[in-house]
Image: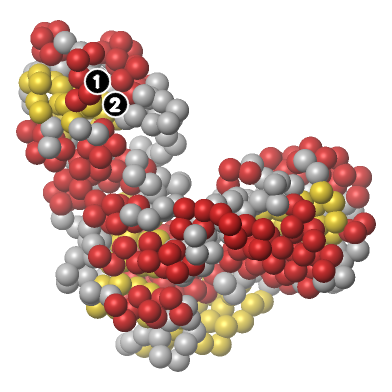
Amino acid sequence: MAQSVSTTEPLFPPMTWKARDMVSATGGDLLSEGKGGEFPRIRIDSRILSAGDVFVAIEGPRFDGHDFVEEVIAKRPGCFVVSREKANRFSPAELASKGIAMIAVEDTVQALGGLAAHRRKEANIPVVAITGSTGKTTTREMITCVCRRVYNTLSTAGNLNNEIGLPLTLFNLSAVHRLAVLELGMNHPGEIRRLSAICEPNIGVITNIGPAHLEGLRNVESVARAKGELLENIRPDGAAVLNADDDYGRKLAKAAPVRTILFGRSEDADIRAERITQKNDKVSFTLVLPDGRVEINLDVYGEFMVQNALAAAAAAHILGVGAAAVKSGLESFHPVEGRMLIYETPGGVYIIDDTYNANPMSMEAAIRSLSGLSGKKRGILVAGDMLELGDSAKYYHERIGHIAGAAGIDRIYLTGSFAAQVAGGARDTGMEGGDIFVGSKTDIIRNLSGWLERGDWVLVKGSRSTGMEEIVQWMTKGASVRMSVSEAQEDRE
């Protein structure tokens, strides 16, 4: 089956592929010409392969597309892309007799990127690429909401932001698209360089720099260098969008090889926010652009969302999107699944689902939001590990315990390898041991079920692979539809 990938089929048919272009893009060898002609789609999952498609046999740590040859041949693909090392598994003559072309390449994952780079150049439309330690998914969605007011826009779906996901997104480009908004993820040096070389952005956005992926990068300075790789591949006539409120953002701006636009609350930021207010379920602020001002009312909770909106506004401004479209686009934005979404249970408990991912910056912001939302009611933190922090993991988990204890949270439920560090940090602030529960997710669910009462506010958060959404799923069984903060806050006082 090769690889299971969650994606959305494009609304418009993507551009087709020719064997000679694929050979050129991958540096491969054409071992079988097949029927020739054009191929409609590129697939890496044999389960969704259709007759005439290109099948790229991706090799990964848990799968190898070359192992599904019989299943793939039965579906009559138009073309195989295989590794040279394993090309002898196939008979070029047999494939030719079946009308199937075959291209042998050095590395099929690298070839996938080469094909995506070819498609990006062929489309020749503006590309916005976003990375950062936190907020990149939200910023990507905000930019998309704004730019779709003006451009037919292709945007990254879900978490397809790595060396496989980015190509799959670019393969959905069609002749009607006028802009692509792409998210770039990473967990080791060189990854952003590779991804940005594939998509050659006209605009590169770095939301912020903080302690994330330290396991592969050691320290925040290394994170800044790795994120800064994006600037190397912005087209010469393009621009970098950087955070004026982030010291690393300013350092990157000084060294950037292209024009820079700074966003933030700082007075010298090119795109800035003034008069920020939080009222019920909206954050309002004055957006100051180089050519005017506009009032923005975001349908979200948390002042930290303003930074994402400013980054989106900066990218849109560079693209020539007017203030009115920026306003309507930002105000149409709604949080991504697992990002500060609020549910009310049948028992009147409010669940804040922020399980999409976690690092020290986003965990701190979420805890402060919980403190503000719960008001005089009880606030409860249910936290899993923050992963990929390397040797700094114990320090940052202990620090989160300090923050949670100092925020006045009533009870903390912890699970994972670093639960003891969070608990220790909370106790250091004077939090009673009886208000700190450490156990498995099952243990937490059992304890919570007998302890929660009407009006409680529960924040659930952890890194994606910790599976903290399982707790949300249990707690929200029978819950009302997703609600706004203003509806929930009617009962909090």
What's the residue type where badge 2 is placed?
Ala
- Please, what is the three-letter code of the amino acid marked with disc 1? Lys
In the rendered view, would you say 310 is above or below 177? Answer: below
Secondary structure state at the residue bearing disc 2: loop
Q: Secondary structure at mark 1?
A: helix
Q: Give residue 436's quadrant in the image.
A: bottom right
Q: Which labelled disc corresponds to residue 445? A: none
Looking at this view, is 416 or 297 the one in front? 416
- Between 450 and 50, the one nearer to me in the picture: 450
Query: Distance between the Cα atoms at labels 2 and 1?
Result: 10 Å
Residue identifier under label 2: 57
Answer whether labels 2 and 1 touch (C-beta < 8 Å): yes
Q: How many marks?
A: 2
State which mark lies toward you, 2 or 1: 1
Q: Which mark is residue 86?
A: 1
The structure residue drawn at horizontal position 41% and vertical position 38%, both measured from the top left corner, is: 7
Image location (x, y in percent) of residue 3: 40, 29
Residue 172 located left or right of residue 98: right
Q: Is the residue marked by circle 1 packed among few (<14), some (14-19), or many (20+) residues within 10 Å?
A: few
Q: Position of residue 186 (x, y in %)?
A: 41, 53
**Which quadrant: the C terminus?**
bottom right
